[in-house]
Image: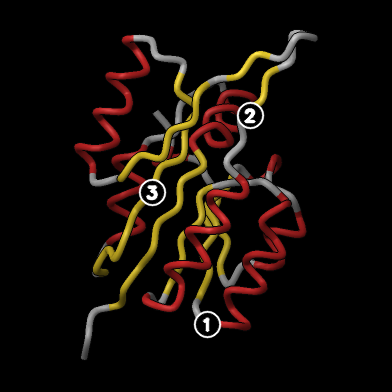
Amino acid sequence: MAQEKVLILADVQNLYYTTRDAYSRHFDYNQFWAQATAGREVAKAFAYAIDRGNEKQRQFQNILRAIGFELRLKPFIQRADGSAKGDWDVGITLDAMDFADRVDTVVLASGDGDFALLAERIQQKYGCQVEVYGVPELTALSLVNAASRFIPVEGRLLL
């Protein structure tokens, strides 16, 4: 039997803030990779991040690349009012739609409820499973409900 093919989409900003806010800890990308890819063939794996251009961030990006992620980076944008812009929702959605027809399962690591519609559409249009990894108390219920499977980010998935 052919090995299950998987597409991995990691929303770095969402994972950073939700694990920090809920646990005062960091997301363990190595453990996540091990768990999400166990017994599966990785078709593509993207990590979406905001690039502030500092050395610590470059080191983190190199770690993600070494694990197996292809990085999608956007520059950090500070607005005149002091707020910041930097979300990858559209980019994640486009990659999901571009690659979902080539895989059995889409693994989405994000708690952002904006992705509930995407999870539903991928399942309907491509017959894929959609696994969502998210911090339980900070993951939108709509996304949990839309997922084929919800995997809580806790315990071994934290540093």
Q: Residue at coordinates 45% horizontally, 22% vertically from top-left?
A: 51
Number of the label disc, if any, that sits on residue 22: 2
Which badge, 1 or 2, is on the more N-terminal residue? 2
* Element assignment for label 3: strand
Mark 1 is surrounded, within 10 Å at the Cα level, by few (under 14), some (14 to 19) or many (20 or more) other residues, namely some
Q: Residue at coordinates 68% horizontally, 19% vertically from top-left?
A: 84
Which badge, 3 or 1, is on the more N-terminal residue? 3
Q: Is residue 99 toward the left or the right of residue 137 in the image?
A: left
> Looking at the picture, does residue 145 appear above or below residue 83?
below
Q: Nearer the viewer, residue 32 or 93?
A: 93
Mark 3 is surrounded, within 10 Å at the Cα level, by few (under 14), some (14 to 19) or many (20 or more) other residues, namely many
Q: Nearer the viewer, residue 115 or 95?
A: 95
> Looking at the picture, does residue 53 appear above or below residue 20?
above
**Residue where numbered disc 1 is placed:** 126
Q: Where residue 71 sits: x, y (%)? A: 35, 39
Number of the label disc, if any, that sits on residue 46: 3
Amino acid at circle 3: Phe
Q: Residue at coordinates 32% horizontally, 28% vertically from top-left?
A: 61
Query: Residue 40 falls in which quadrant of the image?
Result: bottom left
Which badge, 3 or 2, is on the more N-terminal residue? 2
Q: Residue at coordinates 46% horizontally, 72% vertically from top-left?
A: 100
* Element assignment for label 1: helix
* Element assignment for label 2: helix
Point out the image quarter for the N terminus. bottom left
Which of discs 3 and 2 lies nearer the camera? The answer is 3
Amino acid at circle 2: Ala
- Alpha carbons under labels 1 and 2: distance apart: 34 Å
Q: Where residue 154 sits: x, y (%)? A: 51, 41
